[in-house]
Amino acid sequence: MQIAVDTTKKERKRHGNDAFPILISPESILRYEQGNFLWHWHTEIEVTLVTEGEMIYEINDSLHHLQKGDILFCNSSALHTGKNHENKVCDYISLTFDPKIIYGYEDSLLYDKYVKPIILNPGISSVLFKPEDKSYQELCNFYHDLLSLDQERAEGYELDMVFIINRIWKIIYQNAFTTLDTPLYDKRNYTRIRTILSYIENHYSEKITLDDIEKELNLCKSECCRIFKRHMKVSIFNFILKYRIEKSLQYLINSEHTIGDIAESVGFNDPNYFAKTFHNIMECSPMQYRKKHIGIMM
């Protein structure tokens, strides 16, 4: 499986609903293909608690090596991705919520004083809390209180959850300004990255050149490559290859198309090159992948 995103890499999954935009979900990194979830973003706040194992988690320019017990705040609209560490298991709990839960409506005192300075600050993409940190134990206790409320769902639990999320936010607020990213990330560059990702999403089945991306961004090819590599930690070319392979996985499992047809449908003109690239990324051939996963599904 992989995270479902739209053309801007915004996650499609709903985090709660309009009436109560809070979601708590247990996750495991090994549920995702290759033990990693792809770059994506969402307007909701995300707070992750690692319950087992280790994970490499990137948020904008910040890289975190998360270990059991760590709690990580990911800001609204920040690009993020995660992968397993040394092919090990990593289980974690994800808390996502709309920041409106805290401030109610824009231009309120709570929004102007406690929320806006964080969610609109380009230097705050994440805050990591480790067991040895001063605020950690209180934050951890609140997190576990939330889990209990969500599991039991006794009368009035929604009010209690909102109250605790406000307490969690107070701790994040008190710590956010001591962990500003250095250097501050350039918001304009992340808009450019989303534009590149959107272009790849819409044209991955076609031939994509740097000339195409240059025209899309109205920015020289070398600068496109530099910005993308700096923030995504991979070249545009290698990202496109991996993205095409990711797209091929569902075709292999859910269709009877030939390997050659699937290769062409995801942008490979040469089936042999597709097979070679697939093996380099997935460590098995397309046919081996198909047989393995169809067997699992049956």
Image (tube, rainbow, N blue to C red):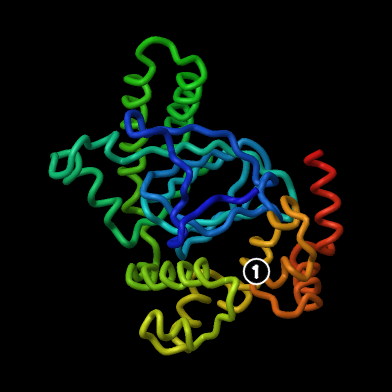
Question: Looking at the picture, does residue 76 appear above or below residue 50?
Answer: below
* Residue extending farthest top: 155
Residue 85 is left or right of residue 202, and the answer is right
Which of the 4 image quarters holds residue 282? Answer: bottom right
The quadrant in which the C terminus is found is top right
Task: Left or right? Give the position of 245 relative to 37.
Answer: right
Give the camera-side residue of 214 and 100: 214
Q: Nearer the viewer, residue 27 or 203?
A: 203
Where residue 6 appears, as percent x and y from the top left, is 46, 56
In-front residue for pair 141/231: 231
Report the residue at 43% width, 27% height from top: 142
In this picture, residue 245 sits left or right of residue 133: right
Residue displayed at 58% across by 49% down? 66
Determine the residue positioned at 81% across, 77% down: 272
Above or below, 158 relative to 219: above
Residue at point 36%, 68% (across, down): 191
User: In the image, residue 156 lies at what x, y percent?
Assistant: 35, 13
Q: Is residue 69 above or below residue 230?
A: above
- Measured as percent of width and height from the top left, residue 197 is found at 48, 68
Query: Picture coordinates of residue 260 (x, y %)?
Result: 77, 71
Instruction: Note whether 262 is above or below 292 in the view shown.
Output: below
**In the rendered image, which residue does mark 1 sit on?**
266
Crowding at mark 1 (Cα within 10 Å: few <14, some 14-19, many 20+): many
Q: Quadrant of residue 267?
A: bottom right
Where, by quadrant of the figure, is residue 67 drawn?
Answer: top right
**Residue nearest the observer in this picture, 96 or 6:** 6
- Asked if residue 13 lies left or right of residue 174, the reply is right
Q: Amino acid at mark 1?
A: Val
Disc 1 secondary structure class = loop
